[in-house]
Amino acid sequence: MRKLLTCVLIAFISIPVFSQVTFQRNGVYDERPAQYAFKNATIVVDAQTILDNAMIYIKNGVIESVGKDLQVPAGTFVYDLKGKRIYPSLIDIYSDYGLPELVRPAGGRGFGGLPQLETNKKGAFDWNQAVKPEVDATNDFKLNAVKAEEMRKNGFGSAVVHSPDGIVRGTSAFVSFGDGRENEVLLKGKASAHYSLDKGTSTQSYPVSAMGSVALLRQTYYDAEWYKKGGSSQERNLSLEAFNEMQSLPQIYDANDKLGILRGDKIGKEFGVQYIFKGIGDEYQRLDEIKATNSSLIVPLNFPSAYEVEDPFDAAMVSLTEMKHWEMAPANAGALVKAGINFAFTTAGLKAKADFWTNIRKAIEYGLPESKALEAITSTPAKLLKVDNMVGSLKKGMIANFIITSDNIFSKDNIIYENWIQGKRYIISDMNVTDIRGVYDLTVGEKTGLKLNITGKPDKPEYQITLDSTKFTPKVTRMGDLFTISSKFDKKETNDTRLSGYYDGKNFKGEGVLVDGMQIKWSAIYKEIAKETTKKDSVKAKTPEIGKIIFPFTAFGNEEKPKQETLLIKNATVWTNEKDGIVTNTDVLLQNGKIAKIGKNLETPAGAKTVDGTGKHLTNGIFDEHSHIALLSINEVQTVSAEVRQEDVINSEDVNIYRQLAGGVTSSQLLHGSADCIGGQSAIIKLKWGENPSNLLIKGADGFIKFALGENVKNGNNPSPSGRFPQTRMGVEQVYMDEFQRAKEYEKSWKDYNALGNKVGVIPPRKDIELDVIVDILNKKRFITCHSYVQSEINMLMHVAETFNFNVNTFTHIMEGYKVADKMKAHGANASTFSDWWAYKMEVKEAIPYNASIMAKVGVTTAINSDDAEMARRLNQEAAKTILYGGMSEVEAWKMVTLNPAKMLHLDNRMGSIKVGKDADVVLWNNNPLSVYARPEKTIIEGAVYFDIEKDEQIRQSVAKERNRLMLKMLAEKTTGAATQRPTPRRNQHIECDTIMEMLDAGK
């Protein structure tokens, strides 16, 4: 009778409850209300509310009531769940379920191929293919039965689905994992707006860099604002209309990594947008900075597998960053909780959805509280999506999305029995299955001494038969309490003995056929609980020990960021770069980040540290005027890319920062490359190893921008025709003339608009972030550093500048500067050059090593730069070459890598020399800094020691010790049978002016 009633109940509750009113039905209509009650359950209403022996009543797919001692209407099917639990079904906040698979374009999208300069998308849409706010996942969503079933088995009831394609990706749909029509499972259209810096499937050339993506997104915001203020009367743009419409939705930004979150937050603050950032699970590495964004996060659970490091050559390919992240990634969520950062989990990025529960339990093992884990998959995503009135908890009026479990949802032995979605039942595991696990004495005919061991889970038991030390794995078929077993009982047997029988609630009985065909009876008598199912003492598992965070999260990082100190450097030979020149036996006091005193026999202030400079040389730090280190992007590929900013792509994790500190460099100008006539805006930084990108920037520095002349900008070295204007040096000049004329007209349009007393009904000019920068050049608020080689082009650009009444600040490379030094001096231009490079390409064939000294003697402020991460470590030696080639004095040679670059970048009022009141950016050398034997012993920035040669040795030993510890841990992990991964060889890219990079991940 009980089984019959169960069958009737199952048949009835399988009726769909969210039927489509407007759809015709093929069959009879059944309009009976679908109402069910589930009693005697432990109901987890939300992470804070748990009801014991409670009831939940649902009707037509909606929760009517939750509580104790509820009265339900007659005709309600009551389900007794004594000993079981009910949780809200899970929500995946970041999914592409049900959407078309993206097909990435083949081949490169920059130099080396035919560029697509304009959009090929037809219609009144945005000028750039990567901007597609008009994409609405609601229109493209199609049910996927296989993937829906997979998600249901893991307890998920709903998801936000969007197309992860492009920079502006459009809007999402909020759908359930039900199996009805699309009309039935679509819970909410336009649920959220989505962004990234990945151009996706766009085949358009621009942008090719992360900084180009930032600029494109920023310009889109400004264009949308202009469109809203009246621009729509000048052009119809369906993309901008859609962009404005989606601003009221939750804004989700795929940040790619920890630095991407900071980058995205900067964009958000510019436009008053609070993004929800989707990360990659490395947020623990920059907790303070991420906390300061006040953002919520979407966090994946795709923890990396241990690397195979048995072979030393393989092990050498695994970076310390990768090793430490393998160990610390599971602790990410727990760290976010401790920091007070709100987050939701997603299955995005998992190789297999089945890893979801394994990894979330691992996160709990590593310190994530269970209550926060539950919030991260239920109420938090619902609140972030503003659908917490529909899903995420079990309250009156909400959709009946819930799961029935055997135990605590995070227990390893928990079984998800059923997943109810929109009031419809989906059976995951039979909750009425009998638990048969245990150890049994098995008798088969005359054969005794056999053991039947049943372990595993109640719904998925695992079987093993043993005879003494011999083990057999039988094939078992189960239908309720009926069993068919096939197995060998002797290794010599070639065929199986076949048994058929039933479970009587404690023991097994039945009949069978032996290998020789003889019919026999068999039995399995229960003896004891299987060892696997024996309850362990309720001792809380100890959180695994992990290494420490270092800043930055790479080799040579520090557990604490360097701090400003009061330092007295005594009895050193001081290269002042001032009128005193080089002074011996002199003390220098560094205090509050500044040079406080210079003199002999200075008293040591209270709390100051004393550094013995006897026999050593103290200089100010080297300033590299032309560098490309610490950047994720170097070039954009438009003829004019003034809108891009190097500060948007600073990679504070680049080990070249530390390496150059070890060479005495304290500051660098990070320049755009030379692919464009007008490149991007520079970033001028101090090499504060361990700080975040924004803290590297020199506050209050003037703005600079990269221009370029010659072969690179006209694609002279490209074997394939690029199709991009200009193709000749004459065309380069016209680009400049046209751009500055456009900027003058643009500025006038804004002046005319701003001068209006009454602006009502007047459409403002469109803000153009490219032309804004060019206007700043005209107004002497931003200054040019120009890549240059040939004298004719150098003269040309000075002529263009004088035509528009401004000066070119600096010619960099300037290999034929010795030919035009007099004109450069008259113009007011500076020169930043190489010491002795020549003949490495055609336009450098007339370069000479005397170039720097000739320009300097003519009166041009001249610097020696690196343009190379390796050369920057030896700029002191590059400066010394001007003594050999041209007879420069030691003092003037040293200024070429210190004071002169500071002058060029308008920072000599605070940097470039050792003078009271200037920044305490100094280097203590073991020898004359122009000697090939000189090595920095301490490199100090604003009074904080960022490189110390003695500490460096300790760090190297610490890195080796940490790597060894982690490798041993990985080897131990492998012995447990855990998944591993082969190390991937990587080639460090040598970055130069013409390098094209598409890199967003600082770890790559």
Image (cartoon, helix red, strand yellow):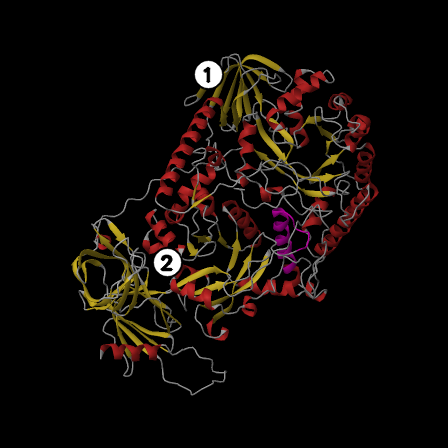
**Mark linked to residue 603:** 1
Residue 653 place in picture, x, y as percent: 52, 38
For the image shown, how many numbered marks are present on the structure? 2
**Of marks 1 and 2, which one's residue comes earlier in the chain?**
2
Which residues fall within the magenta stretch?
A: 203-224
> Is 258 situated above or below 759?
above
Q: Is residue 615 magenta?
A: no
On the question of residue 466 being in view, the answer is yes
Horizontally, residue 955 falls left or right of residue 463, namely: right
Residue type at mark 2: give it.
Glu
Q: Is residue 208 magenta?
A: yes
> Is 165 situated above or below 208?
below
Q: Quadrant of the C terminus?
A: top right
Horizontally, residue 958 falls left or right of residue 836, namely: left
Residue density around tag 2, few if under 14, some if 14–19, many if 20 or more, within 10 Å: many
Secondary structure under badge 2? Answer: helix
Nearest the camera: 702 or 18? 18
Horizontally, residue 633 falls left or right of residue 299, namely: right
Give residue 193's quadrant in the image: bottom right
On the question of residue 386 being in view, the answer is no
Residue 229 place in picture, x, y as percent: 65, 62
Secondary structure under badge 1? Answer: loop
> Is 24 situated above or below 306?
below
Dominant secondary-structure state across the stretch colored magenta: helix
Residue type at mark 1: give it.
Glu
> Is 660 situated above or below 972?
above
Q: Which residue is mark 2?
A: 375
How far apart, in angstroms, are the residues tagged by discs 1 and 2? 60 Å
Residue at 34% in and 50% down: 364
**Mark linked to residue 642:** none
Residue 526 place in picture, x, y as percent: 17, 60
